[in-house]
């Protein structure tokens, strides 16, 4: 049983947190890690050139498990890569500086990793809340088991929300975010490591996602650019069928068309077809 494993033998979990001008919410995010029922973790916080009180807030926490790094403003993917290069954990996961980990988020995913050693990626339900976290907007639950590549390519929502996977480190795999894109970076990472891995999801909530004006959907041009780069990379993948590649392109066009249309941006809604297809 998991409970019988002595504390010192529990796997180390690395939690990756980039932070940019995060003074409003980062204390709450850090506290949610400290309050985890699972204690063998390290939290790697990378300050991405913040000009507010982010640094002083982080340094006010006196916990040896918190590792602090600072860099010039190079973007969220570059910040995450600093943490990935320095992490020591057997497993790792992401937490943005404005989101929250439910108390059992780490333990429930580690339990699944230990009990199902064939599983490389563990997900769970994601609760989307408003900016003040006093209203639930949506609850995402996933039911996929097996290799996630086809589901990721087809953007079917069966195994992907965003930074909610816990990942088992596998020797020889390269864990790195594409620093040339600002949207869709988690999807790009997952696609780059999913070829021979098994994904499983648990019922427990693993992430409380704070929806704000800075969410990915608020910058449609950035989202479109990210999708275009991901599609370009998927086209090079030998393990993805031509049918699935075509399906992904059609899904991206539909997503972007409806997104632009929801903003009453008729011009971009119509012309996105030609930008995605390159015609």
Image (spheres, rainbow, N blue to C red):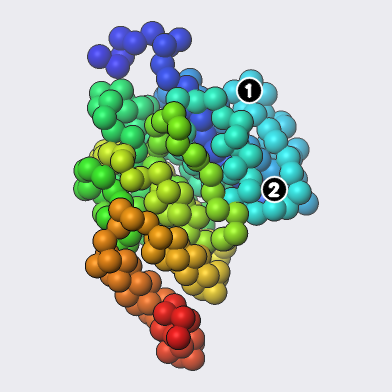
Q: Nearer the viewer, residue 159 or 228?
A: 228
x and y, in percent, of residue 245 in the image: 32, 66
Q: Nearer the viewer, residue 90 or 209?
A: 90
Residue at 52% across / 34% down in the picture? 15
On the picture, is 57 further left or further right than 27?
A: right
Residue at 50% across / 25% down in the picture? 89
x and y, in percent, of residue 197 in the image: 31, 39
x and y, in percent, of residue 39 in the image: 47, 21
Residue at 43% across / 54% down in the picture? 187
- Whether residue 252 is visible here, answered yes or no, is yes
Residue at 45% across / 25% down in the picture? 90
Q: Which mark is residue 48?
A: 2
Q: Which mark is residue 63?
A: 1
Q: The C terminus appears in which quarter of the rendering?
A: bottom left
Kindly state the secondary structure of the residue where label 1 is placed. loop
Residue 261 drawn above or below residue 89: below
Residue 228 drawn above or below residue 234: below
């Amino acid at each position: 049983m998991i409970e019988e494993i002595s504390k010192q033998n529990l796997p180390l979990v690395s939690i990756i947190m980039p932070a940019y001008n995060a003074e409003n919410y980062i204390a709450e995010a850090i506290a949610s890690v400290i309050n985890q029922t699972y204690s063998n973790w390290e939290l790697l916080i990378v300050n991405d050139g913040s000009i507010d009180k982010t640094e002083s807030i982080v340094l006010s926490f006196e916990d040896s498990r918190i590792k602090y790094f600072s860099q010039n403003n190079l973007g969220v993917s570059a910040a995450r890569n600093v943490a990935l290069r320095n992490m020591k954990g057997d497993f790792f996961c992401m937490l943005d500086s404005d989101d929250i980990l439910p108390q059992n988020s780490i333990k429930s995913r580690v339990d699944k990793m230990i009990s199902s050693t064939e599983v490389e990626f563990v997900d769970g339900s994601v609760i989307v809340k408003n900016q003040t976290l006093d209203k639930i907007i949506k609850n995402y639950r996933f039911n996929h088991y097996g290799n996630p590549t086809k589901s990721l390519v087809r953007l079917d929502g069966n195994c992907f929300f965003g930074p909610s996977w816990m990942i088992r480190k596998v020797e020889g795999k390269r864990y790195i975010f594409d620093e040339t894109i600002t949207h869709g970076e988690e999807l790009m990472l997952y696609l780059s490591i999913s070829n021979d891995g098994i994904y499983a999801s648990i019922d427990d909530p693993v992430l409380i996602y704070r929806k704000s004006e800075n969410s990915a959907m608020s910058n449609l041009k950035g989202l479109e650019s990210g999708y275009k780069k991901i599609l370009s990379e998927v086209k090079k993948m030998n393990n993805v069928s031509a049918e699935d590649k075509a399906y992904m392109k059609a899904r991206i066009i539909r997503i972007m068309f409806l997104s632009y249309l929801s903003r009453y941006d008729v011009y971009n809604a119509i012309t996105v077809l030609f930008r995605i297809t390159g015609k």
